[in-house]
Every structure is written in C-alpha cells, then in structure tokens.
Image (cartoon, rainbow, N blue to C red):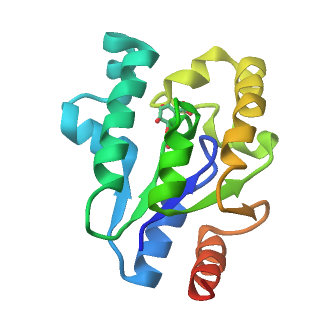
Amino acid sequence: MKVSLVGFMGSGKSSVGKELSNLLDLPFVDLDEEIVIRTGKSIPSLFKEVGEKGFREIERELLLELLKLKKDFILSTGGGTPTYKDSMELINRYSSSFYLKTPFSLLWERIKEDKNRPLVSLGKERVRELFKEREKFYEKAKFTLDCEGKTPQEVAREIALILSSL
Ligand code: S3P
C-alpha cells in the first residue's frame, strides 16, 4: 500500500508522514527531499535556476517514478505537486491519498518566516490566493482530514484507522 499526503505548505505533511511511517512500519519518502538529493540543489536554488515551471517538471518526473515503484511507502508531496498537469489523478491512481486540511491563517503563521520556501516571498495576500486556487486540487484526494487543533500524531492515528478499515 502506498499512501500520499497532500496539502498546502505548512499543513504538516512531513511531520504526519513520519508519525504514520512509524505507526505502520512503512518507509517515509519526502518528495522535496528526494528532489534535493536527486538534483544536488536546494529548492530555492532550483527555483532560481530553472524557474517554477522547471521545478514542477522535475517534481512531476520524480513523483511518477516513485508512484510506479513496486515498494510501499508513505509519501509527503510538496504543496504544489497535486496542482501540476494531471498529477493529482496519478496520485489517486497509484496511492491512497489524504488531504491535510488546515485553515490559511494557521498555515501562514507556520510558513511566513521560512526562507526555504520560495513562494512565501510572494507575500501573504498572493499566497492566500494560491491557497484558494489549490484547494480544488487537494479536495480530489480520497480522504480529507480536518487538521485544525490536532497534533501530527493524532492526524497520523486517524489516517491509520481509516487505512485499517479499507
Ligand atoms: C511548494 C511547496 C514546497 C516545495 C516548494 C514549492 C509549493 O513543499 O515543494 O517550495 O508550491 O507549495 P512543502 O509543501 O513541503 O512546503
């Protein structure tokens, strides 16, 4: 079984993914980290060198490669991954997907100082618009979890429970 976590920057995909990986004893894969390993470059330098479009192409290629692997894992996607081309359909075809739904105000508080997330430099109002544009993609996930006021461990437990009932 492959499990994909989707949601905006700061929604806790990586921390929930690590908790879930412990709970289910499955490897954890972070798509951003894989991109950094594969290219040998940080996310901000990739955005500078190849632009957002170039980054999306690299991200999508790696996503497809991972989803088609035989092994099982918990995948934490990037906030923009599901919004490019038909990536959300691919995520749903090859894995059980969960949207970690979190209010924008909380997301912004978590990400606003983060220099490793190039899109944050667009400023709060543009990032809010981005969040609104992206929700329709995230909502295509098989399951939506309301994450407000919950710890990563609690969210991971909820996901494990849902998975056990499938
Ligand atoms: C992005 C989110 C980031 C990373 C890149 C672009 C986005 O991942 O892929 O900075 O477009 O929302 P996280 O969601 O893990 O921060």
Using the image as rendered, state which of residue 107 and residue 46 is in the foreground.
46
Tell which of 95 and 129 is nearer to you: 95
In-image side of 140 versus 77 (left or right): right
Q: Is residue 97 visible?
A: yes
Report x, y in % for residue 72: 33, 70
The residue depicted at 63 percent of the width and 47 percent of the height is 7
Residue 53: quadrant of the picture? top left
Residue 41 at x, y percent in the picture = 24, 28
Residue in the picture at 74% in, 29% down = 133
Q: Residue at x 35, y 58 (%)?
A: 29
Is 9 or 159 nearer to us in this picture? 159
**Figure check: 50 above or below 24:** above
How far across and how far down the image is residue 129, in percent?
77, 24
Q: Quadrant of the C terminus?
A: bottom right
Quadrant the N terminus occupies: bottom left
Q: Position of residue 79 (x, y in %)?
A: 56, 39
Q: Please say whether residue 33 is visible from this viewpoint.
A: no
* Total numbered circles: 0
Q: In the figure, is residue 166 to the left or right of 68?
A: right
Q: Using the image, determine if residue 41 lies above or below residue 76.
A: above
In screen coordinates, is 27 left or right of 51?
A: left
